[in-house]
Amino acid sequence: MEVLDMIKKFVRIIERAFGADVIIYDECNLFEGSRINDIPAFRRWHTNPYCLKIKRNDPLRKRCQRLKRSFVKSVLRSGGVAKSTCFSGVTEYVLPVFYKEHLLSMVAITGFEGRLHEATYKALSSRLGLSLPEFMRFRGASLKKADDEALIIEALEILAKLLSDYIMTETGIPSLLDNIKLRDNSHILKAKEYITKNFTEPITLASVAEHCHISKSHLKHLFLKTIGHGVAEEIRLCRLSYAKELLCTTDHSVKYISFLCGFTSSDYFSVAFRKQFNSSPLRYRRSKRGEPS
């Protein structure tokens, strides 16, 4: 059995065993075009009904995104399994996957109940337009109990090992990273981190190069040599990936989503989305929600 098939099978086993979601995060956009994109768990957002309802409230969604960034940093500092309960009471277990010193991905099991103060439940229910009893029933029906934490951690470790094996045997990432000079690699990683944090803003090759303290031509050359596409393409891919999340987790119009993602034109956004994913934004939203196209 191929490693990718083993990953798919184990993801299904985990989701059945815990009733929770498995997520494979591509924090560095390294797997674009890889077969691992076919795995339903390969995504950037939580899909349980409770999280989707929270994220359809704009202020709560933005708060969720800010906390995610800080959580990623805490995961990297820990180096092992990290557990976190967000402001809305969803608990997630995450394990980073490294190749040498390079972060390649993170695997997570999420959608568990976390404990919050009653005042927080009241505030959230009010924000979502639900009575407190309605809110608690909905939350209880959407989230699962983490009854065996040791088993969750063990499952994460196995999944991370399978993903690492896939990366080693089925992708060119290890040789790619081994062939990057340390100095050049630091520029690439610094640029990627800056783009990931700021792609919703009007950033350009010039602003990214300025942040990395190198020339535009040198940064462009490094990206083309090591990643296979330029800085502008990296920014565009980040924006399109975020657009997929917003299409699935909000009811915002396509025009407003294009603005939130950093596109200056909704028409260009629609063209870029169709070219990248072979689907219009609205058709993608309907397909992910099980709605007729």
Image (tube, rainbow, N blue to C red):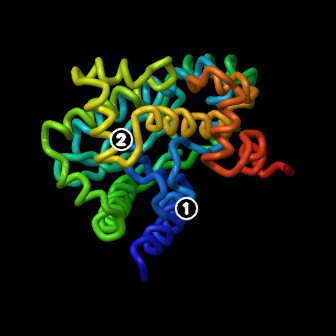
Spatial separation of the CA atoms under disc 1 and disc 2 = 27 Å
> Residue 1 at x, y = what percent?
43, 83
Judge by depth and name the residue closer to the eye, 145 or 21. 21
> Residue 18 at x, y = what percent?
51, 58
In the rendered structure, which amino acid carries the disc numbered 2?
Lys
Residue for point 28% across, 66% down: 168
Residue for point 62% across, 40% down: 244
Helix, strand or loop at label 1? It is helix
Which mark identifies residue 208? none
Q: Does residue 91 show up?
A: yes
Within 10 Å of disc 1 (Cα), the crowding (few <14, some 14-19, many 20+) is: few
Q: Is residue 42 above or below residue 255?
A: below
Q: Does residue 53 show up?
A: no
Q: Residue furthest right?
A: 292
Picture quadrant of residue 47: top right
> Residue 53 at x, y = what percent?
68, 33
Q: Is residue 10 above or below residue 218?
A: below
Q: Nearer the viewer, mark 1 or mark 2?
A: 1
Q: Is residue 197 above or below residue 59?
A: below
Residue for point 29% across, 52% down: 97
Q: Horizontally, is 149 left or right of 266 in the view?
A: left
Residue for point 85% across, 50% down: 293
Helix, strand or loop at label 2? It is strand
Which mark identifies residue 38? 1
> Residue 192 at x, y = what percent?
34, 34
Q: Earlier in the sequence, mark 1 or mark 2?
A: 1
Check if mark 1's residue and mark 2's residue have beta carbons within 8 Å: no
In the rendered structure, which amino acid carries the disc numbered 1?
Asp
Look at mark 2 in the image and give the residue it sits on: 83
Judge by depth and name the residue closer to the eye, 198 or 114. 198
